[in-house]
Image (spheres, rainbow, N blue to C red):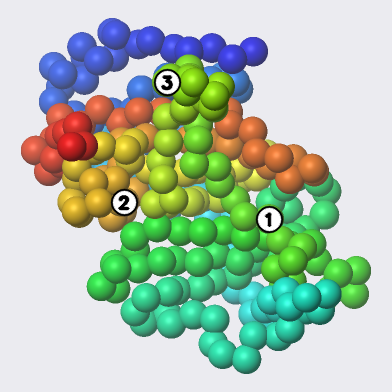
């Protein structure tokens, strides 16, 4: 059952300690959400930053595969003739095989690392079913793109005259980090809510996961549907970060 959580006491403690912290503001899996929130806050207390590399949950996936990528062309799948990525500058890639949608079968998972001037800016993860013969042919016509820019477990922000519902959104500029707890894979999405003027002229891009004011934890099911389980907001008290500004 969805619950929106208001933790005013933690806000007060955070202000007194002058340390950044994450507040859990939505939970549909209390054990998971509380554990991840505690993990991140312990990192902030000890290191002033979240260090995913120090946690076994975020190091389960091994990105060591080489796929053949096929694009759709009419009713055929055509092998890409050009290199898919430039690992030095604009687009880095890595691939892995794991059960990202928790259906009991491994998928081919392709990770794109979009970059601006050589610095990671946002990520995209796509996955496709693996053929029974173990082939590493990644067919885009069968693939699913991870991520939904609209965070629908938050209250609706406003409703248009035609009934369209506006939710809190991240745009496409997000940082995605898959992880595993027990037998289930999840996706941690680090992003800035629109209007937080941190570092770039677009006012909502991400530069690294520690310069983001929101985290969503979600999982995918066998029907390739995304389920948001946790939302966390980061309260910045450190002068390292620019405070939120309303976009003009």
Assess disc 2: are there few (<14), some (14-19) or many (≥20) residues with their C-alpha within 10 Å of its C-alpha.
many
- Residue 153 picture location, percent across and down: 54, 23
Badge 2 vs badge 1, beta-carbon distance below 8 Å: no
Residue drawn at (49%, 21%) of the image: 161
| 51 vs 3, nearest the viewer | 3
**Location of residue 4 in the rendering, given as x and y in whole percent from the top left corner:** 48, 13
Q: Which residue is mark 2?
A: 206
Q: In the current view of this chain or complex, which residue is farthest to the bottom?
A: 81
Q: Quadrant of residue 193?
A: top left
Secondary structure at numbered mark 2: loop
Residue beneath disc 3 = 157
Q: Residue at x 42, y 36 (%)?
A: 169
Q: Are marks 1 and 3 in contact (CB under 8 Å)?
A: no
**Residue 243 or 9: which is nearer the viewer?**
243
Name which of mark 1 and mark 3 comes first in the sequence: 1
Q: CA distance from mark 2 to mark 1?
A: 23 Å
Q: Which mark is residue 144?
A: 1
Taking the view exactly as shown, the residue that stands out farthest to the left is: 239
Q: Quadrant of residue 133?
A: bottom right
């Amino acid at each position: 059952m969805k619950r929106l959580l208001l933790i005013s006491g933690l806000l007060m403690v955070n202000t007194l300690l002058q340390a950044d912290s994450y507040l859990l503001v939505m939970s549909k899996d209390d054990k998971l959400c509380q554990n991840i929130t505690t993990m991140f806050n312990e990192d902030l207390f000890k290191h002033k930053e979240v260090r995913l590399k120090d946690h076994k949950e975020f190091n389960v996936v091994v990105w060591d595969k080489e796929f053949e990528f096929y694009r759709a062309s009419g009713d055929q799948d055509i092998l890409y003739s050009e290199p898919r990525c430039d690992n030095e500058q604009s687009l880095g890639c890595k691939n892995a095989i794991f059960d990202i949608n928790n259906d009991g079968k491994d998928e081919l998972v392709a990770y794109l690392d979009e970059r601006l001037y050589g610095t990671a800016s946002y990520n995209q993860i796509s996955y496709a079913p693996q053929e029974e013969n173990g082939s590493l042919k990644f067919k885009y016509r069968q693939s699913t793109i991870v991520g939904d820019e609209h965070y629908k477990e938050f209250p609706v922000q406003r409703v248009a005259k035609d009934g369209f519902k506006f939710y809190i959104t991240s745009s496409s500029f997000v940082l995605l980090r898959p992880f595993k707890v027990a037998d289930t894979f999840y996706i941690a999405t680090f992003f800035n809510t629109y209007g937080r003027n941190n570092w770039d002229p677009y006012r909502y891009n991400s530069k690294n996961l520690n310069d983001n004011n929101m985290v969503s934890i979600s999982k995918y099911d066998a029907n390739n549907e995304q389920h948001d389980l946790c939302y966390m907001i980061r309260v910045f008290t450190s002068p390292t970060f620019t405070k939120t500004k309303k976009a003009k």
